[in-house]
């Protein structure tokens, strides 16, 4: 017999009340919510927000790397600061062929090799100039390189998002830029390699904050250095990822130059922002890296009261609004990131796989290491779908034969 709407509504209210009782019990008795849920054969996804009605939003096609697939064009590419390979997946999709990938962190090298055993991955430090020159020359010699160098020096020292838990006027906000002891000079270390091997095209990726450090003086020095070496360089290109089929508010800076007389033709943005709700309609099943963190009952109790788009000030986490792009997926510090967002429909933080989907990584792409470091890899990456559109523009602008 078909249930009427009033009966369904009544049962829904009863379920919510029972769930609230579980959370309340854990708070009152100071017991683990995770253990209590397990005892009841429940998960965090059986919990719900007080306001859990799903808003309407525009249904949009989920754009993937397959939408940009092109045959192997044989154009060689060397990648620096490769991380988990976000930029590299984009270039691979449109037909570039990797000669070498350079990554300092062994765990990130493991992720690259795990997913692409055919890639040559070198665990090396770009700041060690002589070591880099010796290694790269084994692959390409010392003649001008007729391919592309791509690299995004670690951006945390230039980033607002990396400091988003602090007020920009507060003493804890530390966007130290080029003064950063470890990462501040990596941009110029990378430029030194560009000047040494003279790739036909280079790409520098970072956050827009790079343009503001030292009132733009250091970036002006970098431009002058590269122009003196014979490169014609586009003005800094700032792109919003949500205008390029990425369901996330992520703003990135690209500096692209070539030793030709051409300039890059920019990829065309879409008319609409990509909202994140469509991503959460996709079933997860037994997806790889779909691991959720444990939460205290007190935290979940606070989360459950949040409306869409609101922030839990104590935990510094935001409930995503499915009618808008996700907020930026962040890497966090050495202990990992990914904790700045709550699932729009379940009062818990996103899993690694959910974060990776918002970054447009394929579901079969595996992130190695502990969960916290998986979040770091996802949060550090350039969204592969955005990278593919940049790669396509580079290919068409500089490598297309007339």
Image (cartoon, rainbow, N blue to C red):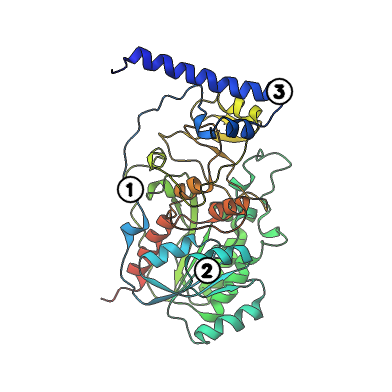
Answer few, some or many: residues within 10 Å of disc 3's Cα (few below 14, many 20 plus, some between 14 and 19). few
Tell me the residue that label 1 is attached to: 270
Q: Are marks 1 and 2 in contact (CB under 8 Å)?
A: no
Q: Residue at x 52, y 68 (%)?
A: 113
Q: Secondary structure at mark 3?
A: helix
Front in this rendered view, residue 116 or 274: 116
The x and y percentages for residue 241 are 43, 49
Q: Is residue 137 above or below residue 351?
A: below
Quadrant of image for the N terminus: top left
Sooner in the amino-acid sequence: mark 3 or mark 1: 3
Q: Secondary structure at mark 1?
A: loop
Q: Are marks 3 and 2 in contact (CB under 8 Å)?
A: no
Tell me the residue that label 3 is attached to: 29
The x and y percentages for residue 301 are 61, 25
Question: What is the spatial separation of the Cα atoms under label 1 and label 2, in whole angstroms?
Answer: 33 Å
Sooner in the amino-acid sequence: mark 1 or mark 2: 2
Closer to the eye: label 3 or 2: 3
Front in this rendered view, residue 127 or 32: 32
The x and y percentages for residue 345 are 47, 32
Question: What is the spatial separation of the Cα atoms under label 3 and label 1, in whole angstroms?
Answer: 52 Å
- Is 31 situated left or right of 197 in this image? right
In this rendering, the count of numbered labels is 3
Q: Are marks 3 and 1 in contact (CB under 8 Å)?
A: no
Sooner in the amino-acid sequence: mark 3 or mark 2: 3
> Mark number for residue 113?
2
């Amino acid at each position: 017999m078909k249930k009427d709407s009033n009966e369904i509504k009544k049962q829904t209210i009863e379920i919510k009340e029972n769930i609230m009782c579980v959370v309340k019990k854990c708070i009152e008795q100071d017991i683990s919510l995770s253990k209590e849920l397990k005892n009841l054969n429940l998960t965090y996804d059986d919990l719900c927000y007080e306001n859990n009605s799903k808003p309407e939003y525009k249904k949009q096609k989920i754009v993937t790397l397959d939408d940009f697939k092109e045959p192997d064009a044989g154009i060689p590419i060397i990648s620096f600061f490769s991380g988990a390979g976000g930029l590299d997946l984009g270039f691979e999709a449109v037909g570039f062929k990797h000669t070498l990938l350079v990554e300092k962190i062994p765990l990130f090298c493991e992720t690259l090799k795990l997913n692409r055993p055919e890639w040559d991955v070198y665990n090396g430090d770009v700041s060690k100039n002589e070591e880099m020159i010796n290694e790269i020359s084994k692959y390409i010699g010392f003649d001008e390189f007729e391919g592309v160098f791509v690299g995004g020096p670690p951006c945390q020292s230039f980033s607002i998002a990396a400091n988003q838990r602090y007020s920009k006027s507060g003493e804890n906000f530390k966007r130290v830029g080029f003064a950063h002891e470890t990462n501040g000079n990596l941009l110029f270390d990378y430029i030194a390699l560009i000047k040494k091997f003279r790739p036909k095209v280079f790409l520098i990726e970072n956050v827009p904050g790079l343009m503001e450090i030292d009132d733009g003086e250091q970036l002006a020095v970098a431009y002058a250095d590269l122009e003196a070496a014979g490169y014609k360089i586009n003005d800094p290109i700032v792109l919003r990822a949500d205008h390029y089929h990425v369901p996330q508010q992520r703003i990135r800076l690209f500096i692209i130059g070539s030793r030709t007389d051409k300039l890059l033709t920019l990829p065309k943005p879409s008319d609409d922002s990509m909202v994140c709700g469509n991503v959460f309609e996709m079933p997860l099943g037994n997806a790889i890296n779909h691991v959720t963190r444990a939460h205290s009952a007190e935290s979940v109790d606070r989360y459950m009261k949040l409306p869409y788009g609101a922030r839990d000030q104590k935990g510094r986490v935001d409930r995503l609004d499915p009618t808008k792009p996700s907020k930026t997926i962040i890497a966090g510090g050495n202990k990992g990131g990914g904790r700045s967002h709550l699932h729009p429909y379940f009062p818990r933080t996103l899993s690694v796989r959910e974060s990776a989907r918002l970054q447009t990584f394929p579901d079969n792409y595996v992130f190695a290491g502990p969960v916290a470091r998986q979040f770091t890899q996802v949060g550090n990456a350039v969204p592969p779908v955005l990278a593919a559109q940049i790669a396509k523009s580079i290919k068409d602008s500089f490598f297309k034969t007339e």
